[in-house]
């Protein structure tokens, strides 16, 4: 049994529970053997178990910093029941006790304490109760009460002692136990039929008392009761279960109560209620049992209606979520395709529609500069603005990433107010950033009569516009820098072109697309831009560089970063240039970054730069054969270079060589007969 106590008291508490468990087992074995009137078992051991249980529960109450009042009530229930049993042991004569004795007063006083303790514990969890849980609890309470009333109360009322004090007390005990079972059923239902260890022990403690009382009342009513039987062990065992419950660790409650029991138990209790109604048909039971069973059946009907409503709401929510972008609340790709099918059918019947495909410009730079949380917030704002801008004339969608679509329910062109409003909604600017959108427009059905073709055509037209825009600030700045470097070191310009070509092919081999490939290619072109600040005597030195010259040379990546940061459009490229001479093993420069901490684009540039340097003629070395250069890259993979990037570079180089060979063969076989061909 898992207990939560301090190191100094845990050993003593565990020892007490071992003693308690052993005493219960001894009492049970004695009952099996028939201990008769032996006071050592029937009185001292019996009451000793209960007194130890009281001590353990009240000891736990003193240690609690929470739920102290609730457990104080349950501790009072255990103490009051124990006191009643002690009084009974002192006052009984020949196994009997006069009705209305002090023991009966104490027994009756114990019940309200148990009710109050359970209610207080349930109140602490009420924040996550649902209507379905309340109905489940009500169903469990009504069914348990109905079964008890049918099985126990019926023979008690028919015992022939009507109007006597003994009958009143017997019926009173049955009613109190009925309420006890009601609280147990309520608690079980409210836990989603997964009460946990502590609540299971509380239920066991209260249920054992109610059950043994019911059996006792039934046997008394039918004249079959036998004192000192195995049944009597259930009374002290129930109080011991409450002690175990008090010392269980407190576990956080959860709203996730889905379980197989949640589906099975309502059906079980409903069957119990029907059994009571069946008993009343063949063998008359007390009216209270019938009424309780009918109420349980009504609760089942309400539970079924509530379950249907919950399932319907769940279905609608799942359908809505399946067609909605979680971030912006706009329709997603699935919703667009469905609406586009409807629009296409409408368009072919004579009513024109227009598909607008937008891709944000500058969003990746914004994301890199301000972080993904800020990027998500920006997408949400732009999505809301786009939805408002096209309200009444069309529907807005987010396909994922920074791609948006609008389906306009009429024919429009790029200069129409609807299109201009949508484009303006996807624009935002601030200090250090500017967001716009490239557009692909498809008229339905003039441009396309197929849904997939319409979306593909819109995508192609959008990228065509985006490509034409890339000749703006970023392209102009890049061209100026490359021109300056070419004027200073013409051979560096050729080297940077080669590295850029290899880098773009390697990035594509790794599965990168679009703007990411473009940034890596720009970084490859400009990775040596910082060398414009390095003296020619160092750049063109035919021999090895000394320590001071190496220190100066290693500053060129930092210088290159500073140069590129002066152009806001090249900020993402600047970060790749700074890291382009880092090594996989962390022994590079300028920051000694290692492994996957190095930006992927910089790792690609490093491999492509090294290869081109090896196969190029330099003032201080001869060119290396391509096969030898590739072998050197593989040898240094895992130390200087990212092994994955080396493999991708080798695959891209192989594809490039294959394309070159194919083009050469095409030229060979296309040459006129008799014309000499040079290889």
Image (tube, rainbow, N blue to C red):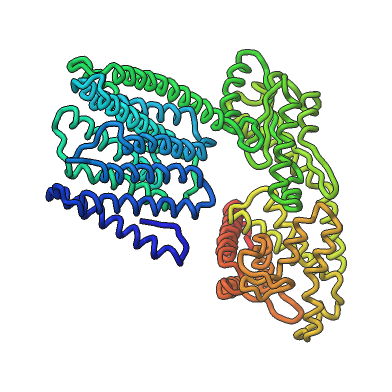
Residue 137 occupies which quadrant of the picture? Answer: top left
In-front residue for pair 545/497? 545
At 41% from the left and 57% from the top, the residue drawn is 3
At 25% from the left and 33% from the top, the residue drawn is 98
The quarter of the rendered structure image containing the N terminus is: bottom left
**Residue 500 as seen in the image, left or right of residue 303:** right
**Residue 275 in sight from this viewpoint:** no
236 over 392 or under it: above or below: below
In-front residue for pair 115/516? 115
Q: Position of residue 132 (x, y in %)?
A: 45, 28
172 over 38 or under it: above or below: above
**Numbered-mark total:** 0
**Residue 498 in sight from this viewpoint:** yes
The quarter of the rendered structure image containing the C terminus is: bottom right
Q: Position of residue 165 (x, y in %)?
A: 27, 25
**Residue 236 as seen in the image, left or right of residue 328:** left
**Residue 260 as seen in the image, left or right of residue 396:** left
Q: Position of residue 636 (x, y in %)?
A: 58, 74
Q: Position of residue 247 (x, y in %)?
A: 42, 53
Q: Residue furthest top?
A: 350
388 over 34 or under it: above or below: above
In-front residue for pair 470/420? 420
In-front residue for pair 328/39? 39
């Amino acid at each position: 049994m898992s207990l939560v106590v301090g190191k100094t008291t845990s050993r003593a508490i565990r020892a007490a529970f071992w003693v308690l468990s052993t005493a219960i087992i001894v009492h049970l074995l004695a009952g099996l053997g028939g201990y008769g009137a032996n006071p050592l078992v029937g009185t001292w051991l019996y009451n000793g178990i209960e007194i130890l249980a009281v001590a353990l529960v009240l000891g736990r109450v003193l240690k609690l910093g929470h739920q102290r009042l609730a457990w104080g009530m349950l501790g009072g229930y255990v103490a009051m029941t124990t006191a009643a049993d002690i009084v009974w042991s002192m006052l009984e004569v020949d196994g009997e006790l006069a009705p209305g004795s002090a023991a009966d007063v104490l027994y009756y006083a114990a019940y309200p304490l148990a009710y109050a303790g359970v209610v207080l514990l349930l109140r602490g969890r009420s924040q996550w109760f649902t209507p379905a849980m309340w109905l489940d609890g009500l169903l469990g309470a009504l069914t348990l009460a109905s079964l008890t009333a049918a099985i126990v109360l019926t023979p008690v009322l028919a015992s022939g002692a009507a109007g006597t004090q003994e009958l009143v007390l017997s019926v009173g005990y049955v009613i109190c136990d009925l309420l006890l079972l009601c609280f147990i059923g309520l608690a079980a239902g409210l836990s989603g039929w997964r009460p946990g260890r502590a609540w299971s022990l509380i239920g066991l403690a209260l249920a054992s008392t109610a059950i043994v009382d019911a059996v006792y009342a039934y046997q008394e009513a039918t004249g079959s009761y036998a004192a000192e039987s195995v049944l009597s062990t259930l009374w002290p065992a129930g109080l011991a279960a409450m002690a175990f419950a008090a010392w269980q660790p407190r576990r956080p409650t959860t709203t996730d109560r889905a379980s197989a029991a949640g589906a099975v138990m309502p059906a079980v209790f409903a069957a119990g209620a029907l059994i009571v109604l069946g008993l009343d048909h063949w063998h008359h039971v007390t009216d209270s049992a019938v009424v309780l069973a009918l109420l349980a059946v009504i609760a089942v009907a309400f539970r079924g209606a509530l379950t249907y409503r919950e399932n319907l709401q769940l279905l609608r929510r799942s359908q809505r979520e399946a067609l909605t972008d979680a971030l912006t609340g706009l329709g997603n790709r699935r919703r667009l395709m469905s609406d586009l099918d409807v629009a296409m059918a409408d368009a072919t019947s004579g009513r024109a529609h227009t598909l607008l495909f937008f891709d944000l410009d500058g969003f990746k730079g914004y994301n890199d500069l301000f972080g993904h949380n800020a990027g998500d917030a920006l997408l949400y704002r732009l999505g809301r603005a786009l939805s408002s801008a096209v309200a009444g004339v069309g529907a807005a969608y987010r396909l994922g990433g920074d791609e948006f679509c609008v389906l306009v329910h009429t024919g429009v062109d790029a200069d129409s107010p609807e299109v201009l409003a949508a484009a303006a909604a996807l624009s935002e600017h601030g200090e250090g950033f500017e967001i716009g959108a490239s557009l692909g427009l498809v008229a339905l059905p003039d441009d396309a009569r197929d849904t997939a073709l319409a979306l593909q055509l819109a995508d192609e037209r959008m990228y065509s516009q985006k490509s034409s825009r890339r000749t703006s600030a970023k392209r102009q700045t890049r061209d100026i820098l490359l021109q300056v470097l070419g004027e200073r070191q013409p051979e560096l310009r050729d080297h940077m072109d080669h590295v850029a070509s290899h880098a773009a092919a390697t990035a594509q081999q790794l599965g990168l697309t679009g703007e990411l490939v473009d940034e890596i290619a720009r970084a490859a072109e400009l990775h040596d831009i910082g060398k414009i600040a390095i003296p020619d005597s160092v750049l063109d030195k035919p021999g090895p560089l000394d320590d001071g010259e190496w220190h100066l040379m290693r500053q060129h990546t930092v210088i290159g970063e500073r140069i590129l940061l002066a152009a806001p459009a090249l900020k993402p490229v600047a970060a790749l240039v700074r890291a382009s001479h880092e090594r996989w093993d962390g022994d590079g420069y300028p920051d000694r970054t290692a492994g996957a901490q190095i930006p992927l684009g910089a790792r690609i540039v490093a491999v492509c730069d090294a290869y081109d340097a090896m196969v190029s003629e330099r003032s201080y070395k001869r060119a290396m054969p391509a096969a030898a250069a590739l072998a050197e890259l593989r040898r240094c993979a895992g130390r200087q270079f990212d092994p994955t990037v080396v493999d991708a570079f080798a695959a891209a180089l192989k594809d490039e060589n294959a394309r070159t060979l194919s083009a050469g063969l095409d030229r060979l076989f296309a040459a006129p007969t008799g014309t000499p061909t040079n290889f």
